[in-house]
Structures are given as structure tokens and as C-alpha cells.
Image: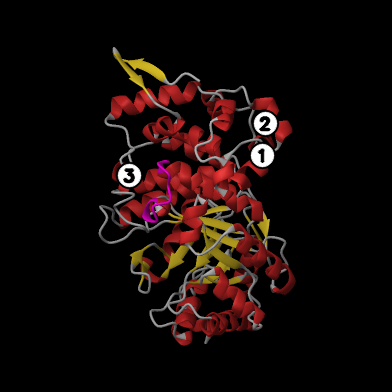
Amino acid sequence: MITKTTVLGQTYQFRDLKEIFAKANEDKSGDQLAGIAAEDSRERVAAKQVLADLTLADIRNHPLLPPEEDEVSRVIEAGINEKIYSEIKNWSVSELREYLLSHQAGESEIRRISRGLSSEMIAATTKLMSNLDLITAAAKIRNITHCNTAIGQQGVLASRVQPNHPSDSIQGIKAALYEGLSYGIGDAVIGVNPVIDTSDSVKDILLMTKEVMNKWEIPTQNCVLAHVSTQMRAIRQGAPADLIFQSLAGSEAGNQAFGIDVALLDEADELMRKEGTSTGPNIWYFETGQGSELSSEAHFGIDQLTMEARCYGLARKYQPFIVNTVVGFIGPEYLYDSRQVIRAGLEDHFMGKLHGLPMGCDVCYTNHMKVDQNDMDNLGILLSAAGVNFVIGVAMADDVMLNYQSTSFHDIAAFREVLGLRPAPAFEKWLEKMGIMEHGKLTAIAGDPTIFM
């Protein structure tokens, strides 16, 4: 494995694959904070040159976090199709990139080859891509999943309605939910982040959202984004949950900081398949975000993009209905400004899609970042053009419970209208029945929640 190169007369020698990966990454404040980023653009180019010439076998044979030390690594290894891997293991990373962007690589070809790739191979390819490369390759991939309804079809931009409330007021949640539905938002999921992580609170919210779904015959699915163990207790108490949720990290230690491990996820999966209220077969909702492993000191010197890719390697074990990166939520310590947030959103979407996941994005930022709503508009349009499965809608783009900025209900309606995208088919039929949409366009009553009163 060649680990050195010369750029403009200067020779760069990298000590191992971990350093090559870190320094080939695009500039991220999180990698700088971890002390693993490239010193300057020239060193970054040198690392990219070395990485481009490495083979996929080089990456697999030199694990960044060995399987004997980490259960996420074991899950990723177990998920590799050995026959497909044997066909491509001698490809260089640059050859994989060229193949994914080539005209001969269509959706079926990419879906097949992805089964022979590890998360680290996917991360390596991502580091060699421009923003437009990430959009172009991701746009080829459609990952369709089914819970109560199906999303991910060509030409569909689904959405999560996020009617959070700072005191978990059932009436307050319901009011925001009705506003979101009136804009045509909620076909991916009615997903509520609770303030109070108790089984009683989770059960109350699930009962209310299921009651709304049943009363208005809404073809969607519900979920409360509490800790997985809290949701399990609520489900055992009879709460009607269509999806079960959990945030993931890219290492065993990172997941321990979240209070989970593979055994607990397996237990939750078994419970949902017995007692969940959806049709299935896809019954999981996972969230991720670059930088979480650094927050918990569980990154092992691996760059945040690669750790994010490993989250997707863990997620695909469970064949989820939806996955999204909460791209700008953690803060400027990990993604400093709009350029880094936009880049990370496109990276995460591409990596999730190449893992075979139904990838979405919370296009968001915290108020102490060098980002504004115009930047979120830009990223929302770019991801919509890239074929993102779903994005998240919050009343007025301002989540008053989580205290961060996302995309609004009407932002998502605008993404659809500008790019000629539609809600999920079953949901669009419901919108037409309610008079909210006609021939793919919102009607005059759209945005008026009093239609549900």
C-alpha cells in the first residue's frame, strides 16, 4: 500500500490509512478540533492523490477500527457480499468513483455493486467527489421502502411533519400537526420529539397521532423520537407505534454513549415485528449526524465523514423505512459555516443512498453557526435535485422545543413545485380528497389548518 506522494515538489508521507482518510476529507471544523485535519490545501490534495490510488482491498485489509475491537465494524463486515466484493476488490478508489459517475452505471448496477462495498470504501469515494458529483451519483439511486405506505419513488419528495412542543402539550402538537398536513407535509412520517422521555408521554403522543390518522384516514406512519428503550416500554403498554426510532453512532463506544448496542436494537426490532402497528416490512427510523462520535470521545482518531458512513453500515442491517442526517444540529464545533454544512449534507445523502438506505435530511442549523436560512434554501434545493427521500418540516422553520432552525412546511411545498416533485402517491390521493392538492399543485385552501376543525 503506497502511502506517499509528491505535490509541487514536496513529498508527503502518511503514516497509515487513518491519516490518509482524515487528511483527504474536505475541510471540517470537527476534524480540526480532533487534531486530524490536513494542515493546508496542498496536504489535502496529496492525501486525496494517495487515497485515489488505493484499492478497495487495501481499505478492507487495513481496517480503521478492527472488527475484533468494535461491534459496528463487525456488522459492517458481515454485511459485505463476498461474491460482489471479489469482482471489484482490485478497483482503485478513483475507479469506483468513475464507475459510479459513468453512463453505464445505472440504478440497478449501482444497487448491486453497493452490496460489495464496506462503509469505509463508500467514505473514501465520497472524499474524491465534488458537490456536483455527489448530487449526480445520488440522483441515480432510488431506495423505495414501505411501512404503512411507500416512499422513495422517482419524482417523489416526501416529508416528515415535526410538530414539536416545548411542554409536550397534546393540543399544541395537534395544532402544529394540522398546519403541516394542510401544506401537504407528513407523508414520510408524523414524527414528534418529546420533551419528557417517559413511556407515559410517548404513549400519549402516539395515541393522539394515531387518532388523527384514523379520524382523517391519513396514509402515513407515526413515531415518537424518544430513546428506544422508552419507546419499547410504551409499546409493551399498548402504545400504537408504526415506526421505532433511535439515533446511531459509528462506533460501539459512540452507541454506548447513546445508551444502546446491537443487542438492544435487535430486541427492539423483534418487539416491533410482533407488536408494532404498521404493515411493514420497514419499521425503523434512524437519525445520524457528522460529529456525534467526537462529542462522546468515541471516534478513535477517525474523521467525522468516515464515522458517519459507519452509521449507515449499522443502519442497513435493520432495513429501515427512513434515515436522516441532522446535518447542522450539533453546532459549529463540527460544521463551522454554510459551506461545511452544505458539503456535509450532500456527502451524507450520497453515502446513505450508496448503502442502499432511504436517505433523508434535516436541513438545519443552530443559531450560533455562520449559517442563515438562505443557506438552508440552497441545500434543500440541492438535495431535492439529488433525489433525497424526504426532508423535515417545522412550523415557520423554527423548532421552539429543540431550539434550532430547519425547513418550514411551505419551504418543502416550494421545493416540490420548483422541481416538479410530488408527495408519496397514496398521500397525494388523500390530499386531493381533502381538497388540499389538485393535479400536483396546492389549492387555495392549502396552509389553512382550520379545515381539520
- Residue 413 visible at all: no
> Which portion, as a residue range, is magenta?
294-303
At horizontal 38% and vertical 51% (from top left) the residue drawn is 294
Q: Which mark is residue 287?
A: none
Residue 426 relative to residue 414: left or right: right
Q: For this rendering, which residue is in front, 418 or 201?
A: 201
User: In this figure, which residue is indicated by the disc labeled 1?
Assistant: 80
Percent position (x, y) of residue 392? Answer: 47, 62
Given the image, on which type of amino acid does mark 3 rest? Ala
Q: How is the image coloured?
A: secondary structure
Q: For this rendering, which residue is in front, 372 or 249?
A: 249
Given the image, on which type of amino acid does mark 1 rest? Ile
- Examine the rendered structure and indicate whether residue 265 appears above or below residue 224: above
Q: CA distance from mark 3 to mark 1?
A: 30 Å
Mark 2 vs mark 3: which is more N-terminal? Answer: 3
Percent position (x, y) of residue 49? Answer: 42, 22
- Circle 1 SS class: loop
Q: Which mark is residue 85?
A: 2
Mark 3 vs mark 1: which is more N-terminal? Answer: 3
Q: Which mark is residue 34?
A: 3
